[in-house]
Amino acid sequence: MTAVGERAPAFTLPDTSGEPHALDGSPVTVVVFTCNHCPYALAWHERLIDVARDFAPRGARMLAINPNDAERYPRDSPEQMRARVQQGEFDGVPYLRDETQEVARAYDAKTTPDVFVVDADGAVRYRGAPDADYDDPAQNAAWLRTALDAVLSGGSPEPAETQPVGCSIKWKP
Amino acid sequence: MRVELLFWAGCPSHEKALAELREILAEEGVDPRAVVVREIETEGDAASERFIGSPTIRFDGAEVQPQPNEPAGLTCRVYRRRDGRFSPTPDPEDVRDALRDARAQAHAAPPTGHSPLAAAAAAAAMAAEEERR
């Protein structure tokens, strides 16, 4: 289990083009477990991509990871992931496939979405939901934005942890 | 009218959906306690019920936002709000419209029973509805 303050598990996962991605010591990295088939993940998706776009000039990086069992949930197949990327839904954010689900287990990811903010030293600084209400776009991923602002300015996120809300990770049998 | 809410416990949206459904029923003059809440627990149940995701709301068997091409299964159902947003629960106005459609269908349908009593009761109900209009 990965708790706030602990070191984020290292990983290397392929994106939808097969390119590998890893934590690279960027000033701050958002690791978000997400997927194609979950309405909560879809409801928050644009807000998350907006965060990636808004914070990229300050050195922030976002990695989206789909860990779901695609056999039971075909909408989460690599082909369906690629289709969304090709349609421009990720706006440059790498969409990674966690085929073995080892990364999701290492992070103890619970839901899609489940957001982790990792600082330049590799420590988890925030974990939870993007904001308080998937159904209210005006929330604008406020918890995540606050956490990124805090890390980038040398402070501590407040809150540092919230309850992740969404569909359960679809583990393989 | 038969009002059903089918849910799968792996998706956290059914409580909100049930609360919104009951609110709409009350606003439309239907007893909110009339909702039959049924849990779908297995893939087999999902297949036999044609359950494509949680929550699923049916009025006399007709679904809110029907999605006939979706496969049955234990998952969260994806709805679209009227402004285009994705949501785990249906737009309340879609629920309201589906309820009104089902009531209109029920009133337009011929009596299903063959007994003179059933036919007379249906005719009386239709006459009363006409009277109200």
Image (cartoon, rainbow, N blue to C red):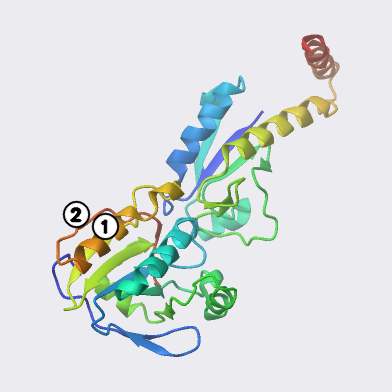
- In the rendered image, which residue does mark 2 sit on? A158
The image shows residue B130 at horizontal and vertical percentages of 82, 14
How many numbered marks does the figure carry?
2
Q: Does label 1 or label 2 sit earlier along the sequence? A: 1
Q: Residue at left 52%, top 64%?
A: A37
- Disc 1 and disc 2: Cα gap in Å? 7 Å
The image shows residue A29 at horizontal and vertical percentages of 29, 74
Q: Give the quarter of the image for residue B125.
A: top right
Secondary-structure class at tag 2: loop
Q: Can residue A108 be seen in this view?
A: no
The image shows residue B113 at horizontal and vertical percentages of 81, 26
* Chain for numbered disc 1: A
Residue type pointed to by label 2:
Glu
User: Quick check: B72 left or right of B129?
Assistant: left
Q: Is residue A4 visible?
A: yes
* Chain for numbered disc 2: A
The image shows residue B76 at horizontal and vertical percentages of 50, 55
Q: Give the quarter of the image for residue A48.
A: bottom left
Tag 1 near tag 2, CB within 8 Å: yes
Secondary-structure class at tag 1: helix
- In the rendered image, which residue does mark 1 sit on? A146
Q: Residue at left 36%, top 77%?
A: A101
The 10 Å Cα crowd at callout 1, few under 14, some 14 to 19, many 20 or more, is: some
Residue A45 badge: none
Q: Quadrant of the C terminus of chain B?
A: top right
